[in-house]
Image (tube, rainbow, N blue to C red):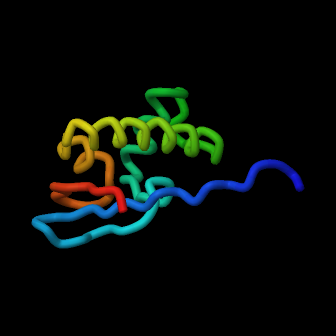
Amino acid sequence: MFGKKKEKEECIRICLNGVEIYRGTMTDLPLKEEIILGKSDEFFNDPNPCFIHRSAVRVRLLAELEEAEKQKNWELWNRYAAFPGVDSVERI
């Protein structure tokens, strides 16, 4: 009635040495707080981000992680995601 039906977001599975450490959507992926604050300061000159800046930073970081996933760049995942030692990500 009010527009298109929202598509269900694809889930991901993150593993460390073959052991699943996260299963959920990219949107819900926990990111390190210090990364969010640092990037907010870098992008918006806002070290104490409001909800809007925090959300914008998350969108940019998640886009970077999706690109890193394609390149199997786990270093970026380990820097941004709140999990130690990510060594694989798969779409489920």
Q: Quadrant for residue 15, please give it.
A: bottom left
Of residue 31 and residue 18, the one placed in the foreground of this image is: 18
From the viewer's perspective, is 18 left or right of 92? left
- Which residue appears farthest toward the left when viewing the image? 17
Total numbered labels placed on residues in the image? 0
Q: Quadrant of the C terminus?
A: bottom left
From the viewer's perspective, is 8 left or right of 71? right
- Residue drawn at (43%, 35%) of the image: 39
- On the image, the x and y values in percent for residue 69 come to 28, 43
- Residue drawn at (54%, 42%) of the image: 48
Please tell me whether residue 89 is drawn above or below residue 58 in the rendered image. below
- Residue drawn at (27%, 39%) of the image: 70
Of residue 42 and residue 29, the one placed in the foreground of this image is: 29
Q: Quadrant for residue 63, please give it.
A: top left
Q: Quadrant of the N terminus?
A: bottom right
- On the image, the x and y values in percent for residue 55 come to 58, 44
From the viewer's perspective, is 80 left or right of 42? left
- Residue drawn at (49%, 27%) of the image: 43
- Which residue appears farthest toward the right when viewing the image? 1
- On the image, the x and y values in percent for residue 11 come to 43, 61
Q: Quadrant for residue 65, please give it.
A: top left
